Image: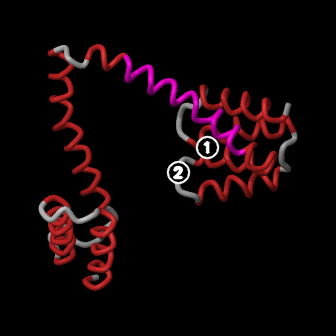
Amino acid sequence: MLFWQLFISFLKIGFLSFGGGYAILPMIQFEVEKYHWLSTEEFQRIVSLAGMSPGPIATNSATLIGYNTAGLPGAIVATTGMVLPSLIVVILIAAFFFKIHSYPWVKSSFYGLRPIITGLIVYAAIHFGFSGSSEAIFHWTTFATLLIGVLAFVAITKYKIHPLTVIAGSAVMGIVIF
C-alpha cells in the first residue's frame, strides 16, 4: 500500500507540475503531510538536501522522500512516479514530430529558430558574464574573459578536447588571471 501511495502521489504531482521545481514543493508537502510520511523538520531537511543536489529539486525530493519512507524500493517507486509523466509527454511529442518533421514548413520553422536560439544563448552569456559589473564594459577583464572564451571554443571545436577538461582549464586560467 505504501508503494502504491508513493507512486500515485508523485505521478499526480508529475502530471500537474508546472512552473518549475520550487512551485511543486507545496504539492509535495501536501502529499507528505496527507500520508504522514515525514515530519515538517524532516521534510525541510530533505528539500534542503534536494536543493543542494544536482538535478531538479522536485525529482530529488521525490527520490529522498521515497528513500526515507520505504528505502531503496520507495526511492525507485517515487522517482518513477515523478518522471513518468514527463517521459510520456516527450514520447508523444517525439512521435508527433517524427510524423511531421519532413514537411517543408516544419523544416523552415526550425531553421528560422536557430538564429533566435543562438542570439538568446549569446545574450545570456553576455548578461551572465558582465552583469553586476560596476566597471566599464571595455576593461582589461572584458578582454581576458573573451580570451578565455575564445580559447575554450577553439579547444573544443578544433582540438576536440573534452568539455570538462576545457571547463577545468578555464577555471584555472580565471584563477591565475583574475
Please identify the residue farthest to the front as the structure is shown.
73
In the image, residue 172 lies in the stretch drawn in magenta: no
**Which is nearer the eye, 116 or 134?**
116
Q: Pointer 1 and pointer 2: residues touching (CB < 8 Å)?
A: no
In the image, residue 82 lies in the stretch drawn in magenta: yes
Which residue position holds label 2? 55
Give the vertical position of 102 relative to 151 (above or below).
above
Main secondary structure type of the part rendered in magenta = helix
State the separation of the CA atoms marked 1 and 2. 9 Å
Give the vertical position of 133 relative to 37 (above or below).
below
Measuring 74% from the left and 58% from the top, which residue is drawn there? 45
Give residue 23's position: percent from left, percent from top. 60, 39
Left or right, 88 with respect to 139, comes to right
Left or right, 50 with respect to 175, comes to right
Neighbour tally class for label 1: few under 14, some 14-19, many 20 plus, Cα within 10 Å: many
Measuring 59% from the left and 48% from the top, which residue is drawn there? 57
Give residue 19's position: percent from left, percent from top. 53, 35
Which residue position holds label 1? 58
Please identify the residue farthest to the bottom as the structure is shown.
176
Left or right, 176 with respect to 83, comes to left
Q: Which amino acid does the dot numbered 1 rest on?
A: Ala
Q: Quadrant of the C terminus?
A: bottom left
Q: Which stretch appears magenta? A: 75-95
**Which is nearer the eye, 120 or 68?**
68
Q: Quadrant of the N terminus?
A: top right
Give residue 172's position: percent from left, percent from top. 31, 80
Left or right, 175 with respect to 4, comes to left
Measuring 26% from the left and 79% from the top, which residue is drawn there? 173
Quadrant in the picture for residue 128: bottom left
Give residue 28's position: percent from left, percent from top. 71, 38
Measuring 73% from the left and 27% from the top, which residue is drawn there? 8
Which disc is residue 109 wearing?
Answer: none
